[in-house]
Amino acid sequence: MSIPGLGQIPPQQPATPTTRTITLRPFWEWRFEVPRSSASQAGATVRLTSGTAERDGTELALNHTYTFPRNTKSKLLTYTGATLEVSGECVDRVAQYNTPEDSPQLPVLNLHFALQELRGAAAANNNNNNHNHIINHSTGGNNDKHGDGGGSKPPGPRVMICGEKDSGKTTMARTLAALATRVGGQPLVASVDPREGMLALPGTVSAAVFGTIMDVEDPAAGFGVSGTPSSGPSAVPVKLPMVYYFGRERVDEDVRLWKQLVGKLGSSVKAKLEADEVVREAGLVLDTPAASVAKGDLEVLEHLVKEFDVNIVVVLGSPGIHGELQRRLESQKTVYGESITLISLEKSDGVAGRDKDSMKFTFDAAIKEYFFGDAKRTLSPFTQSVSFDDVTIFKSPDDPYNDQAILERADISAEMSHWTLAVMNASPSDPPEAIQQAAVIGFVAIADVDEDRRRLKILSPVSGRLGNRPMVWGRWPEPYINLLG
């Protein structure tokens, strides 16, 4: 049977994504941004067809197709020259340099090599300590003047990265960690910037050992939630972070709590450095919140130097911060008797700024990925309906600078809908101070609050009773209204 007019409609050809070839010479960079409004959920795809290239220190495999989702802002760098095949929607350009000395990556490489020398020295010290310990144990002697079995010898370099907003701090931290991993190291990486949420949701401070490669396709280039354990498969070996919940966006919103949590995290970091010889040799890379001399943020940085026994401070693109820190730290020494070295590096001209809308998209995407996965890995969160009486929820105080400000029991109401809560490694009967400073074991999302029936609809990554763990309702990130949309 013929249908009038049907034959007049020309057949539609399927849309074919345009593929481009990008040729890079040594030390050139391909810088790209995938728009948030990209028509494709997949964003842009890239395949390395010849040469070598890396993203923030992690190498790309030859002839493997990588997919970068919407809102990704990053770069691919080559030391040897490379050819890339690019398809999909992205705004990009090639940063060309006449000589390697002109590349903003060269100072980063030089810093990495200097850190490797310090790691080698730490390894030699550890070997000498072990040798002395064996001799002492065999002879009954004691050549350890400090009496701590070798703990007086300093670990590898403890490097703190600081700078103003959008100076490239997190990229620098990620690159140094990845480069150390590539040569067999297992550095500890810590992030005390609650806006970043390394290996966790935003609003946290965290630390983890990086002993394996990072996920190149992760929007956070290996610092996102895709690098943590989940109920689904992972493209790269997962990391196991120690996480504490701050629940606010900026440090100055509750400096006292932030310092308490940083103190807990610093103690965990130092304990790990003492307990694990391989980690001890590799040292620490510390990412910090944005700082400004005008806003009086230097006291926060000085506090971090003490809490983490930092012996190297790298300042990106801020002579003011460098000069002020030099004045404050020039007479200070670490607990190992080391002087504190300050290094000033220029900010890379490739650092991409992040406006409010971009950051909101990033925060929401992290929450969505935590519960539902991403394009490579689909997760199915467990949904449960629980009575108000079967859960214990605390909330952050309205006035954190009140002398009595601690966590307080929350009255469950519809206001909680669409918020993400932290599940604490504590008991509901513990004091509020202990709950507030406990480690995080996971997060849940409040999908719905039925005040009439006094029931909550809760999303969690895994099944299990929630009543035996207290949950904390912070002030940030803000509710994700479209999490289930």
Image (spheres, rainbow, N blue to C red):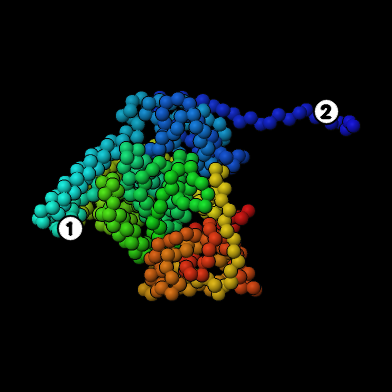
Say whether disc 1 or disc 2 marks the residue closer to the N-terminus: 2
Residue 228, percent across and down? 45, 50
Alpha carbon separation for disc pair 1 and 2: 88 Å
Q: How many residues crowd mark 2 within 10 Å: few (<14), some (14–19), many (20+)?
A: few
Q: Amino acid at mark 1?
A: Asp
Q: How many residues crowd mark 1 within 10 Å: few (<14), some (14–19), many (20+)?
A: few
57 lies above or below 62: below
Nearest to the observer: residue 425 or residue 12: 425
Instruction: Tell me the element at label 2.
Output: helix
Say which quadrant the N terminus sits in. Answer: top right
Numbered badge on residue 256 = none
The residue mark sitting in front, 1 or 2, is 1
25 lies above or below 346: above
| Image quadrant where residue 479 sits | bottom right
Q: Is residue 132 left or right of residue 380?
A: left
Nearest to the observer: residue 344 or residue 80: 80
Residue located 49% across and 60% down the image: 443
Residue 264, percent across and down? 33, 62
Q: Is residue 110 left or right of residue 192?
A: left
Residue under pointer 1: 148
Nearest to the observer: residue 117 or residue 235: 235
Residue under pointer 2: 8
Residue 202, percent across and down? 46, 55
Residue located 43% across and 48% down the image: 238
Residue located 20% across and 47% down the image: 126
